[in-house]
Amino acid sequence: MDPAPHLPVIRSGMRRRLRHQPGAPALEMEGLSVCYAGVPALDSITFSLARSARLGVLGPNGAGKSTLLRVVAGVLQPTSGEIRVYGARPRGHTCIAYLPQKTGVDWTFPLTVVDAVSMGRWGGWNMLRRSTSKDKVAVRQALAQVGLLELAQRRITDLSGGQQQRMFVARALAQEAELLLMDEPLAGLDVNAQRDLLDLVEALPGDPTVVVALHELAVARDRFPQVLLLNRRAVALGAPAEVFVPTHLREAYGDAVELIDTHRGTLVVTDHCCPPQEGKAG
């Protein structure tokens, strides 16, 4: 069961961070499967992701992208298989920052930007937790890094879509996250806001491992060194030039994609009309 959707779940602050196993990949999955009411959402996923990698996860609606991120975040348990984050199970880690889709956030909750970013220091809404001077410095630095310092006292509902996503990145920065999971952060953003957000993620200090679920094939091709093409199972993983080939695209998207050969290469046309609820179908 997913957590109550106030703000994205993060794991930081008062609990001690698990020690990462030397040499262990940032993320490992072996035969990982998830079923909803007996219906497979993920089927025997196996792959490994190196530390500091940046991975784009793509596939049609209902392919299991959100489910995959929830399992990595430790908020959803797999039905079968194994998953390890830096060598240990994800639920014990405090280094994971998980940013779900905007529909998974309760935007009516009365928070300011600085409140939301401060929650990255202590793992969620805890009325007994008082910010230390170290916390305040970290939050201020995070806000400055994403260009929101002047908006620190603004209500989160008054931010633009791009500013809201930058606020969540600031929260991960304040948390000192080493694994950042972002579920369709580009949805609803214009081209300039998408570019600014991706530039920000690419320049994150500390070289965290970043996994982003998205729909935009061209963005993934241009901005991610590695991509995972998913349709309930792993269709292909590797560099975009190796993954975005007609065979893999047809296998992943089926009738939802049309491939047109042109003199400049293969043109990919996708149809996102009437998407299903991924949390229901995978």
Image (spheres, helix red, strand yellow):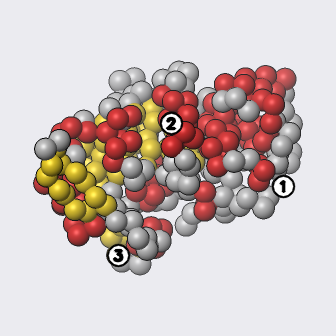
* Location of mark 2 (residue): 195
Q: Is residue 116 left or right of residue 187?
A: right
> Are dots 2 and 1 in contact, CB under 8 Å?
no
* Location of mark 1 (residue): 110
Identity of the residue furthest to the bottom in this view: 37
Q: Secondary structure at mark 3?
A: strand
Query: Residue sitting at 42 percent across and 27 percent down?
Result: 52
Identity of the residue furthest to the front in this view: 263
Q: Amino acid at mark 2?
A: Arg
Q: Nearer the viewer, residue 267 or 240?
A: 267
Q: Amino acid at mark 1?
A: Pro
Q: CA distance from mark 2 to mark 3?
A: 37 Å
| Residue 39 tag number | 3
**Mark 2 neighbour density, 10 Å: few (under 14) some (14–19) many (20 or more):** some
User: How many numbered dots are placed on residues in this image?
Assistant: 3
Query: Residue sitting at 67 percent across and 42 percent down?
Result: 163
Q: Is residue 80 left or right of residue 70?
A: left
